[in-house]
Amino acid sequence: MERQYTIPLRSEFQKVPIFLKTRKAVKTIKKFTMRHMKVEEVKIGKYLNLKLWERGNTNPPHKVQVVIELVSEKKDGKERKFARVELLGAPKEVKKEAKEKKLLDKLKDKVTGKEEKVAEAKEAEIKKEEKLMEKAEERMMENTKTPKLREHDLAKKSEVKSVHEKQFMRDHKEQRPSKPQAQIVR
């Protein structure tokens, strides 16, 4: 069973000293829930608790809209009923069955393939470190502005240089005068 309520808090927390206001608001929510849902045990949800303590100990909200859910659990052969109070519009919590499955998976992993997972994790870490080192080298090269020269790049540069030298010599040979002529002095 699930119900929505707007719980007034101001009239209750005005009765206590300023440094106890939020604590009194929490007690008021529990008391309100016990009265309206007729249960003895109340659990306040995570988001409602954050909302109450959001502005500190001295300034809780004046009223809060909540969803109260009646829950019954069987544990060790005993059935216990309690009310779960959560802020209106807050996301629902994951059921314990899913958590139990996760625990079973963890136990299976411990028994069967723990060594394999450790080896895979180490390999992944090594790859990450290698990538980080490569990125660091690239950054250093960019900062120094000296390009990496490989063997085939050097070979290409020497070929280009020789071609350019030949072209330069051809162009400048035409412009140079041939042997200087003797000057005639008069």
Image: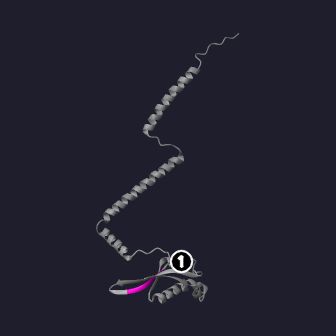
The quadrant of the image that shows the N terminus is: bottom left
User: Magenta segment: does it hold 51?
Assistant: no
- The percent coordinates of residue 125 (x first, y second) are 40, 59
In-image side of 24 versus 101 (left or right): right
Residue for point 56% across, 85% down: 9
> Is 159 drawn above or below residue 77 in the view shown?
above
Which residue ends up furthest to the top in the rendered image? 186
Query: Under tag 1, what secondary structure?
Result: helix
Residue 84 sits inside the magenta stretch: yes
- Image location (x, y in percent) of residue 136: 48, 52
Instruction: Give the dominant element type of the magenta stretch: helix, strand or loop.
Output: strand
Looking at the image, is 184 positioned above or below residue 165? above
Bin the neighbour count of mark 1 within 10 Å (Cα to Cα): few under 14, some 14-19, many 20 and up.
some
- The amino acid type of the residue labelled 1 equals Lys
Identify the residue position indicated by label 1 in the image.
Answer: 51
**Pick the front one: 154 or 50:** 50
Which residue shows up at 61% across the image and 85% down it?
18
User: Looking at this view, is 120 or 25 the one in front?
Assistant: 25
> Left or right: where does residue 64 sit relative to residue 186?
left
Q: Judge by depth and name the residue closer to the eye, 143 or 112.
A: 112
The magenta-colored residue range is 80-85
Residue at (37, 60) in percent of width and height: 122
Q: How many marks?
A: 1
